Image (spheres, helix red, strand yellow):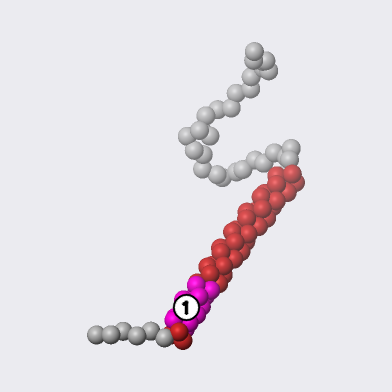
């Protein structure tokens, strides 16, 4: 059995391999870009949530809220006791 190759066959095979590599690199770059967009969107959402929480805390800074009708947990059932200020060394 004799196998013969031609210059055009080799050239065509090389072009096909190069084409496949280019397509795979392109798909890889698209997947990286998609991952980066998702990461940026998630970070932006976290930043927005942190800013909202910060603004809420700044708006309520120094205010006292008394909640009525809330079921107390075991920690909240304890009586509050005022103590004198004491510096710790």
Query: According to the image, label 1 marks what residue?
Result: 14
Specify whether residue 69 is in view: yes
Instruction: Please determine whether, in this image, residue 61 is positioned above or below residue 40.
Output: above
Front-most of residues 10 and 59: 10
Which image quarter is the N terminus in?
A: bottom left
86 shown above or below 61: above
Element type at marker 1?
helix
What residue is at 62 percent from the left and 55 percent from the top?
43
Could you say which is closer to the camera, residue 43 or residue 82? 43
Most foreground residue, 24 or 70: 24
Residue drawn at (65%, 57%), measured in percent from left and top? 44
* Magenta region, residue range: 10-23
Q: For the C terminus, give its image quadrant.
A: top right
Res. 16 in view: no
Q: Is residue 7 magenta?
A: no
Q: In which quarter of the image is residue 4?
A: bottom left
Most common secondary structure along the magenta stretch: helix
- Place of residue 38 in the rendered image (x, y in percent of width and height, measured from the top left): 58, 63
Report the residue that reaches farthest toward the top.
Answer: 89
Residue 74, x across and y down, in percent:
47, 34
Residue 6 lies left or right of residue 77; in this view the side is left
Count of numbered tags: 1
Instruction: Name which residue lies at 38% across and 84% down.
Output: 5
Comparing 64 with 44, the one in front is 44
Q: Residues within 10 Å of mark 1 (few under 14, many from 20)?
A: few
Residue at left 51%, top 43%? 71
């Amino acid at each position: 059995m004799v196998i013969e190759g031609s210059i055009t066959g080799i050239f065509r095979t090389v072009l096909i391999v190069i084409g496949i590599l280019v397509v795979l690199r392109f798909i890889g770059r698209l997947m990286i870009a998609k991952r980066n967009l998702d990461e940026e969107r998630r970070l932006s959402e976290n930043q927005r949530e942190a800013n909202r929480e910060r603004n809420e805390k700044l708006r309520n800074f120094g205010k006292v809220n008394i909640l009525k009708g809330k079921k107390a947990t075991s920690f909240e059932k304890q009586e509050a006791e005022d103590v004198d200020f004491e510096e710790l060394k």
